[in-house]
Amino acid sequence: MMSKRRICLFVAALLPWAAVVAAEPDAAANYRLHINGIAFHFDKGNGSNENNWGVGIERMFGQKPNAPSFLQGWSTFFELDAYQDSYSKLGVSAGFGMQRPMFRYLDAGLKVGLVYEDGLQEDAGSPVLPYLLPFIETRFERAPSIRATLVPPFPPFDIGGLVSLQLIVDLP
């Protein structure tokens, strides 16, 4: 099992990279910081970790003007996150997402990517697994956003599904 100290060091290693990325020209509207913090497990009987502390970065690409009509209005992004998983082990995910406004202050979307977690090789037979996850996100002009991602039950693991919350802050 990965020690909490190693998890903290790994997460801390992402912060300078986030600062360098944010310092690039035109980064003001394009980069966002993720602060992972809370997970609500549907099956609380297995002793799962409810505090999935971690940090990540997101690069927003916005809407594509020449996108096909069924993709009009969708914004795209790439994200990288490091966090504590449900077993208090290190988890890292990288993926691509799309989101679209549903209401004035609420977006909905999908994320697809790969996840690595300590012990995944023993639990699933592979060091990385693909994911496709739905989410909803608040959207305010001057306040941080909150993203709620649904992770459905996955049979090889004893996690009965969860909702993970992230605080998302635009980087200046």
Image (spheres, rainbow, N blue to C red):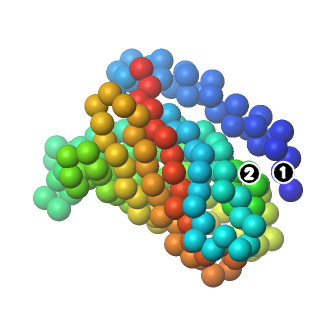
Specify the label residue 163 is tagged with: none
Q: CA distance from mark 1 to mark 2?
A: 7 Å
Callout 1 secondary element: loop
Type of amino acid under label 1: Met
Specify the label residue 90 is tagged with: 2
In depth, the one of 59 and 147 nearer the eye is 147
Quarter of the rendering occupied by the C terminus:
top left
Q: Quadrant of residue 39?
A: bottom right
Callout 2 secondary element: strand
Q: Which residue is mark 1?
A: 2
Q: Position of residue 97 (x, y in %)?
A: 40, 53
119 relative position to 52: left or right: right
Type of amino acid under label 2: Leu
Q: How many marks?
A: 2
Q: Position of residue 69 (x, y in %)?
A: 13, 58
Determine crowd level at label 1: few under 14, some 14-19, many 20+ residues with C-alpha closer than 10 A.
few
The residue located at (82%, 44%) in the rendering is: 4
Q: Position of residue 33 (x, y in %)?
A: 50, 34
Q: Position of residue 44 (x, y in %)?
A: 66, 70
**Is residue 131 depicted above or below 37 in this figure?**
below
Q: Are marks 1 and 2 in contact (CB under 8 Å)?
A: yes
The residue located at (20%, 46%) in the rendering is: 104
The residue located at (64%, 33%) in the rendering is: 14
**Which residue extends farthest left?**
69
36 relative position to 106: left or right: right
Quarter of the rendering occupied by the N terminus:
bottom right
